[in-house]
Amino acid sequence: LRSICGDDGVSQGEAIREQHGKDESMHRCRPPDVVVFPRCVEEVSALARVCHKHHLPIIPFGTGTGLEGGVGAVKGGVCFSLRKMGQVLDLHQEDFDVTVEPSVTRKALNAYLRDTGLWFPVDPGADASLCGMAATSASGTNAVRYGTMRESVLNLEVVLADGTILHTAGKGRHPRKTSAGYNLTNLFVGSEGTLGIITKTVLRLHGIPEATVSAVCSFPSVQTAVDSTVQILQAGVPIARIEFLDDVMIDACNRYSALSYQVTPTLFLEFHGSERSVEEQVKITENITQSNGGSDFQWARDAETRNRLWKARHDAWYASLALRPGCKAYATDVCVPLSRLPQIIVETKDDLIENRLTGPIAGHVGDGNFHCLIVLDPSDPEELQRVHLFTDRLARRALAMSGTCTGEHGVGLGKKALLREELGPTTIQVMQLLKDALDPKNLMNPGKIL
Ligand SMILES: Cc1cc2nc3c(=O)[nH]c(=O)nc-3n(C[C@H](O)[C@H](O)[C@H](O)COP(=O)(O)OP(=O)(O)OC[C@H]3O[C@@H](n4cnc5c(N)ncnc54)[C@H](O)[C@@H]3O)c2cc1C
Ligand SMILES: *[C@@H]1O[C@H](CO)[C@@H](O)[C@H](O)[C@H]1NC(C)=O
Ligand SMILES: *[C@@H]1O[C@H](CO)[C@@H](O)[C@H](O)[C@H]1NC(C)=O
């Protein structure tokens, strides 16, 4: 390995291995045997060939912000930390696309794009690597308007377990649409490092809107907040963000971010467009929220107020933790068809109260996706058990409502059994066939997804 990426490109130090054996989830640290730091795709490929020859597991590592234990080396092996590959390449302004290497994060890309009038909208709360986001099929608050990573990736450069370098849509290609054969790009989006190492991602960009307006609105119930969301979408308002916070979450955010919103179910909204279009969107939305009993519709045009609002939303994780100092947070992530959202949130809140759990709820409600941020004491085995049973019930509730056990965090280590229930044996078998075809020795991130 040293002969490929140099003495400082290989580390067996305990601290480095520990750092690379865990993400931001509750899964315990599973350090790899060694961490390598390749500088280019040729080195990634050469390292993979060595691993292939010697039957060593390969675990790709982005920024370690994952929430499902995806980077844990459950069978030991070699962690490929891609942090030395951090270039932004081939910005095509007129084509609205750009190519990034694995350690470029979403914030770094948007800083790079600052003077071009373009931006990349997909935003999980964390400043994650864009290739890692492709690997988990991440999304976030802007997905309701701009789509998830699935809609954002045009092409991928991938290194397979045996070192083969592959361009999923053909080398150098970046058309906006295609009917050319199987969609291998989509196969690798969401593959969580189990099929190959993503070494370049070609991303779709968007124009920065002329005007942006944010708004906050309080509701008498979960049902009225979700009804408003459905009606806003039905009215054809191209809403950019529509985030739900339950009473417990808004209370936590009030305390943590020194705000003073009413402690009731709340929507945070954002509108993008021309001045006139935004004005019209706000008017229609205000009308809809009022007819559903929403009150306190406060809107903000200035960047400072808007930033304070969205910072509070992105700090929801830390606001939740502050509810029980010294505890840890565990984020659930189910997604259901929109029409089932009020019912599942109401049932979930009852379940939390019945089982004496602290679990503020925040959701990308325009997509039917929500998170319970359960704050728990990890040294209390009885509480851990209660949380475990709760999260299983929540996922099964989502499956019973024709939804999915994960809207955006992925399967990782903890949701393998739920995935089988969700897809059924035939679909799982076909997935296993694909896995066996691309990685017959089961070296790529073993123990995850399947
Ligand atoms: C506070 C907080 C809020 C979050 N909010 C959201 C949210 O709203 N929406 C959301 O979707 N996620 C959210 N996340 C989760 C996380 O940010 C995403 O899952 C993100 O996509 C992980 O990217 P990463 O680079 O950190 O990946 P890692 O954690 O490094 O890896 C995740 C998985 O991807 C694989 N992987 C990483 N890089 C590559 C690569 N180059 N090639 C192949 N496989 C690779 C790894 O092997 C692993 O299986 C949040 C996380 C935190 C801490
Ligand atoms: C193929 O998949 C990618 C990634 O999910 C997606 O962006 C693209 O639109 C898909 N292409 C077609 C033709 O469906
Ligand atoms: C709200 O919508 C109703 C029904 O479409 C309409 O009659 C009314 O004029 C609207 N009110 C405002 C303030 O736009």
Image (spheres, rainbow, N blue to C red):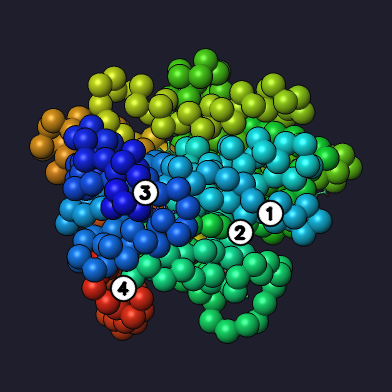
Numbered mark located on residue 439 in the image: 4
Left or right for 434, reference 50 = right
Are the residues tagged 2 and 1 within 8 Å (C-beta)? Answer: yes
The mark lying in front, picked from 3 and 1, is 3
Q: Given the image, on which type of amino acid does mark 4 rest? A: Asp
x, y (%) of residue 292?
64, 44
* Secondary structure found at label 1: strand
Choose the circle earlier in sequence order: 2 or 3: 3
Q: Given the image, on which type of amino acid does mark 2 rest? A: Val
Choose the circle earlier in sequence order: 1 or 4: 1
To which residue does mark 3 refer? Answer: 5
- Mark 2 burial class by Cα count in 10 Å: few <14, some 14-19, many 20+: many
Choose the circle earlier in sequence order: 2 or 4: 2
Q: Mark 4 CB in 8 Å range of ligand 1? A: no
- Mark 3 burial class by Cα count in 10 Å: few <14, some 14-19, many 20+: some
User: How far apart are labels 3 and 1 at the CA level?
Assistant: 25 Å
- Mark 4 burial class by Cα count in 10 Å: few <14, some 14-19, many 20+: some
Q: Quadrant of residue 63?
A: top left
Q: Given the image, on which type of amino acid does mark 1 rest? A: Asp
Numbered mark located on residue 202 in the image: 2
Choose the circle earlier in sequence order: 2 or 1: 1
The mark lying in front, picked from 3 and 4, is 3
- How many numbered tags mark residues here? 4
Q: Given the image, on which type of amino acid does mark 3 rest? A: Cys
x, y (%) of residue 26?
25, 40
Residue 55 visible in image? yes
- Outermost residue toward the top? 258
